[in-house]
Image (cartoon, grey):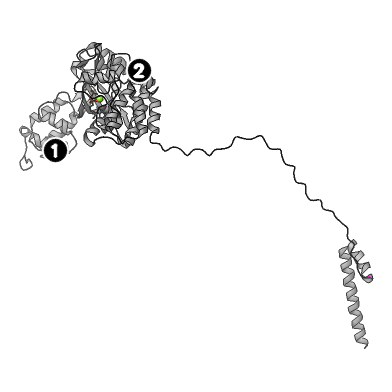
Amino acid sequence: MATSERSKSDSDVPAEFLRVLKRAGILSESRLADIRSKVLAGDYPIDSTEMARKLVKDRVLTEYQARRLLSNRPGGLIIGRYIILEKLGAGSMGRVYKAQHRMMNRISALKIIAPEISNNQRVVARFQREMRLVGKLNHPNIIQAFDADKDRGILYIAMEYVDGDSLGQRLRSKGVIPPETLAEYASQAALGLQHAHERGIIHRDVKPSNLLLGTQGVIKVLDLGLATLHEADEDAQFKTADGVAVGTIDYMSPEQACGRDVDPRSDLFSLGCTMYHLLTGRLPFPGNSPVERLGARITGAHVPIPSVKPETPRRLVEVMDRLLANSPGDRYGSAAEAAEALHSVFQKLPPSPARVPAPAEPAPTPPRPQPPQIKYVHVTPSYPAWFQPIARLAEGSAVGALLLLIGLLLLAFAAGVVVGFLI
Ligand SMILES: Nc1ncnc2c1ncn2[C@@H]1O[C@H](COP(=O)(O)OP(=O)(O)OP(=O)(O)O)[C@@H](O)[C@H]1O
Ligand SMILES: [Mg+2]
């Protein structure tokens, strides 16, 4: 609604919208006063929808916040020290939001755990123990967790925000991932997992939606330490024969599916299942029901990769088959080893070093060539008799001989002049 043509009074201000905005607690008092005075001055529309649109345009509110306020749901836009900016997604454990720290302005991803899980004291205690370990992780291929807390009964985790899609979202939007790209992504994920394994954390829920693809092709492993929320949840949707509740079964290792203790190699199996799905668009252990799919991994081998995607490079098939080995002992010994194998699948082999013959016994040193022997022979030149006194003098003193020669020539010249004069 146009507002500038008529003068405003306090009664014109959209009190309800401003009240909702104030109740949300996302803007400071001074910001609210500023908005109020702009409405009175006619700079902001009176109509709630128009005003919300204007506030979004001026970057005072996000679209998500504006929608919540317009539908009169201001509660929940502040969680702990964070202002909720937008919803990023939802999973089996709760919802994920983009959020801003109120004091530090840092942008984070906030995962809010569903109340069915967070109301379980046993789960929360276990989760807190795991979070103490997770808080120490710091690796470029892991989403770092900054903070975990319970605010007014809401359990949340604040973590590094990555502007990108998960590989699960990418599979849905763009289709399967080419082998070379996939090997590189999986290698990065394995490096992140290795970092966690070294610090005593097993992921237990490696799957496409838990691998985030950030800028410049960096893969970040998500949700480390959160599988504990599934495992200890008595009310989880699916339980193994041992009563161990589990999350997604399609990427689960046989030992995990049986409820046995797991070690880092369980994550390698899940990484293999994740790769299989991202490469082929199919699950390695298909079945019509969760029980069938679970049973398939316990009792048998995965559907051979070449039968689903024949053009897969043989070396990649070998690496994936090893990740997907039924027995942990047949898989790679560590995530670092798997990362190296994945990384090297498409690496050009370095040129084989030129073969250098083994050093032979040192050859005997040849005798040094002797310099030619020069004989100096004294040669006595033969001169006419009249020149011999001069030659002898020259041998003794070259300068003396020269002076004597010049003197003789001058003498001959003078004699010639005298003779000429007399004649
Ligand atoms: N740190 C983050 N930065 C950016 N986006 C994130 C982050 N964490 C999660 N997301 C987004 O939120 C979506 C939902 O994540 P969530 O982990 O809840 O789902 P899920 O992995 O499918 O389920 P679950 O892990 O609960 O089994 C993700 O697909 C991703 O798009
Ligand atoms: Mg997740």
Task: Report helix, strand or loop for mark 2.
Answer: loop
Q: Quadrant of residue 168?
A: top left
Task: Report helix, strand or loop for mark 1.
Answer: helix
Question: Which percent across, then down, holds residue 323?
Answer: 34, 25
Q: Residues within 10 Å of mark 1 (few under 14, many from 20)?
A: some
- Residue 31 is left or right of residue 253, and the answer is left
Task: Identify the image quadrant of the N terminus.
Answer: top left
State which region is magenta.
Answer: 376-384
Q: Regarding ligand 1, which quadrant of the image does it lie in?
A: top left
Q: Are marks 2 and 1 in contact (CB under 8 Å)?
A: no
Up-down: is 226 above or below 373?
above
Identify the residue at the far front of this view.
307
The disc labelled 1 sits on which kind of residue?
Answer: Lys
Q: Quadrant of residue 325?
A: top left
> What secondary structure prevails in the magenta region?
loop
Q: Quadrant of residue 187?
A: top left
Question: Which percent across, then down, holds residue 83?
Answer: 21, 27
109 in the magenta segment: no
383 in the magenta segment: yes
Which residue is found at the position 19% from the left and 19% from the top?
Answer: 114
Which residue is found at the position 11% from the left and 36% from the top?
Answer: 51
Up-down: is 398 above or below 409?
above
Q: Is residue 417 visible?
A: yes
Alpha carbon of mark 2 to alpha carbon of mark 1: how far? 54 Å
Give the residue pinned by disc 2: 263
Give the residue pinned by disc 1: 54
Question: For residue 156, which numbered disc appears in the image?
Answer: none
Q: Is mark 2 within 8 Å of ligand 1?
A: no
Identify the residue at the far bottom of this view.
423
Front in this rendered view, residue 395 or 9: 395
Up-down: is 384 above or below 329?
below
